[in-house]
Amino acid sequence: MTRLTSGDIDTLSDHLSDFDERLLLQTGRNMLGIACHGAGISVKNIQDKIHNLSIAVVTITAGLGIITGFAQTIKDILSHLGFTAFIPTQTDAAGLARAIEDKADIIFMADDNQYFAINLKKSLLIDNIQATGNVFAAALDLMAKGVKGKKVLVLGAGPVGMAAALTLAEFGANVGVHDKDMVKCQENCAALEKKLAKKIEPIHDLTSAGKNFCFFIEATNAKDVITSAMIGPETFIAAPGVPLGVTQKGIKKADNRILYDPLQLGTAAMAVRAAFPLKKG
């Protein structure tokens, strides 16, 4: 979680209800609803079961040091979703042992490099990277009122971007991917195309993207990737990238058609997928 800072999350817990209201305006669903959409499950089918699941959020101090308030913020998000969440008083290995002793169903933990959830009973690990790519693609599908048959450009051919591309393709979108490293972009597109047996197009020329695409996943770690010139009246952007890679003029121009958050949706998607590991279809 090296790209997150305490400043990214210090007031996040205080505004979870406001965030849900904004999501409802943008997508018609709240955090839990978007996470369920990405997982292909029904909110109604799981809502009564959520409260019976216990999630431990273990504080990890190894590495460069903990992000102040990270574990508490994760606990607050999970509680907001309806899960029974707690933070063991011990940290690191002792905290993990305490979570198991306290019969947690699921454990959340993160260090400098990885953030994941483990369903202890099902021996299932859910990584934040794949969950985040999936849930932001699901959010864009809802914002666009369905991406099926529409052209969507994923910016960033890293793990989050390619996870988003996979979900978008499964939703029936015509997916293009751009990355500053076009060799990596072509290789990753080819690998995903082989897996899906569906065309995933590497996009070399970003300057013309605004003319050819109205729907974007911004999954880079760079600033000012999407400019105001790329944004039209029908442009929608779902942005899991940290920091938000849209110029200030672009942010003003797109206004409420940008969906961005540093932690909430990815965490919601992890919780849903860890708790209810159901397959699509």
Image (spheres, grey):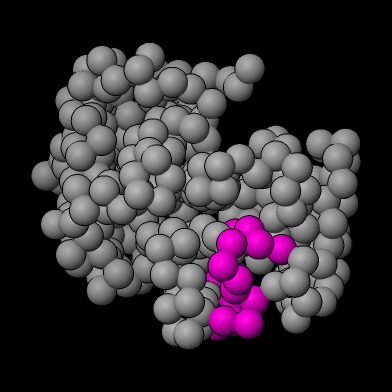
Is residue 116 found inside the magenta-colored segment of the image? no
Quadrant of the drawing holding the N terminus: bottom left
x and y percent of residue 248 in the render? 45, 84
Residue 141 visible in the shown view = yes
Whether residue 130 is visible, yes or no, is no
In the displayed structure, 246 sits above or below 76; it is below
The segment highlighted magenta reads 213-234
On whether residue 225 falls in the magenta region, the answer is yes
Q: Is residue 160 above or below residue 54?
A: below
The residue nearer to you, when weighing 107 against 157, is: 157
Relative image position of residue 52 (x, y in whole percent): 22, 17
- Taking 80 as reference, is 239 left or right? right
> Residue 54's x, y, as percent?
23, 26
At x 72%, y 48%, the residue is 150
Residue displayed at 20% across by 39% down: 80
Q: Residue at image x 57%, y 48%?
A: 144
In the shown orientation, is residue 117 left or right of residue 54? right
Q: Residue at x 44, y 59 (%)?
A: 259
Q: Quadrant of residue 13?
A: bottom left
Quadrant in which the C terminus appears: top right
- In this picture, is 271 found above or below 168? above
Q: Where is residue 60 shown, x and y percent of the image?
A: 29, 54
